[in-house]
Amino acid sequence: MVRSKTFRNMGSKKGYVRTLEVVIAIVLTLIFLMFLVPRVSPDDRQSVKAGVLAALEQNQDFRDCALARNVSCVESMAEDVLPERYSLKVNISSDPEEQPGIDVQGDIYSDSLFIAGSDTSYNATIVRLWYWLNQ
């Protein structure tokens, strides 16, 4: 009888050791996630990346500025939509290959909009917007 009682206590101790191992594994996993995985700040990047030009696409004044290829007008309207801590560059052309030189370190987000023209004439215009967080 004494022998069976000892074996029962050893089994109970093994259960405690395994439970302790699981707790240690969970703690180490949480430490790994907290310190080694890059942190993403919960700012408005997701909402900004959702489409700056999509907010302006139905605005007739914006479409008129884009069809007239008035870069300063398009920039001012885009600046009204973007948060203040972003800088931007606008390109308006009909050439799908045209790209401006942007010399910025860090993440650059882009958005583009194809406007076929007004109701009466076809005037294909591509509005491209590049924006980035000010350093």
Image: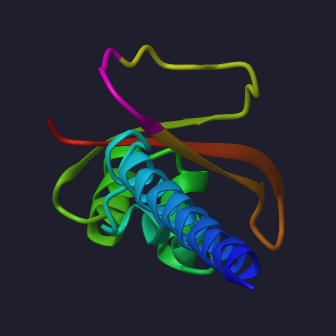
Q: Is residue 4 found left or right of 68 in the rendered image?
A: right
Residue 19 x/y as whole percent? 56, 70
Question: For this rendering, which residue is in front, 43 or 118?
Answer: 43
- In the rendered structure, does residue 72 fall within the stretch colored magenta? no
Residue 42 percent location from the top left of the image: 34, 68
Question: What span is in magenta?
Answer: 103-108
Residue found at x 48% / y 19%: 100
* Magenta-drawn stretch contains 105: yes
Q: Is residue 57 above or below residue 85?
A: below
Say which of 42 and 31 sits in front. Answer: 31
One can see residue 64 in this view: no
The spot of residue 35 in percent (x, y) is 32, 45
Task: Determine the residue positioned at 42% across, 59% down.
Answer: 30
- The rendered magenta stretch, by its main secondary structure, is classed as loop
Say left or right for 47 vs 2.
left
User: Which quarter of the figure is the N terminus placed in?
Assistant: bottom right
Which residue is depicted at the point 57% across and 63% down? 22
Foreground: 122 or 102?
Answer: 102
> Residue 125 falls in which quadrant of the image?
top right
Front residue of this view, candidates 99 and 134? 134
